[in-house]
Image (cartoon, rainbow, N blue to C red):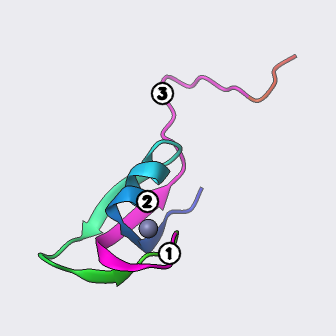
Amino acid sequence: MPKKTMMLCKPCADKLGANATVRVVRKEANMKITCRMCNRRRYGAEYEVGGKEEKGGVDDDGGE
Ligand SMILES: [Zn+2]
């Protein structure tokens, strides 16, 4: 899955992190962003969001 970067506030980044790989790519003190998830102007950072990292090659797509 291609990774993309987006501006997110902390709560939304945490929420996304439950289902995807979220890592900070740019963060500054008191950085104001418009969150892509909740569309609010808040303190946040630029994040790189990708698919959930696979662990041990467990492929759960329905099998037989
Ligand atoms: Zn948000």
Q: Where is residue 15 in the image (x, y as percent from the top left)?
A: 46, 50
Disc 2 residue crowd, few under 14, some 14–19, many 20+, Cα 10 Å: some
Residue 29: x percent and y percent? 11, 75
Q: Is mark 2 within 8 Å of ligand 1?
A: yes
Q: Is residue 43 magenta?
A: yes
Observer-nearest residue: 14 or 56? 14
Which numbered dot is residue 55?
3
Q: Label 1 belongs to which residue?
A: 36
- Residue located at (76% from left, 30% from top): 61
Sequence-wise first label, 2 or 3: 2
Q: Which of marks 1 and 3 is in front?
A: 1
Return the residue found at the far top.
64
Viewer-nearest of discs 2 and 3: 2
Image quadrant occupied by the C terminus: top right
Report the residue marked by disc 2.
12
Sort mark 3 into few (<14), some (14-19) or many (20+) by Cα contacts within 10 Å: few
Residue at 50%, 75% (x, y): give it: 36
Is 33 above or below relative to 49?
A: below
Region in magenta: 38-60
Measuring from the top left, give residue 5's x and y in whole percent. Answer: 44, 71
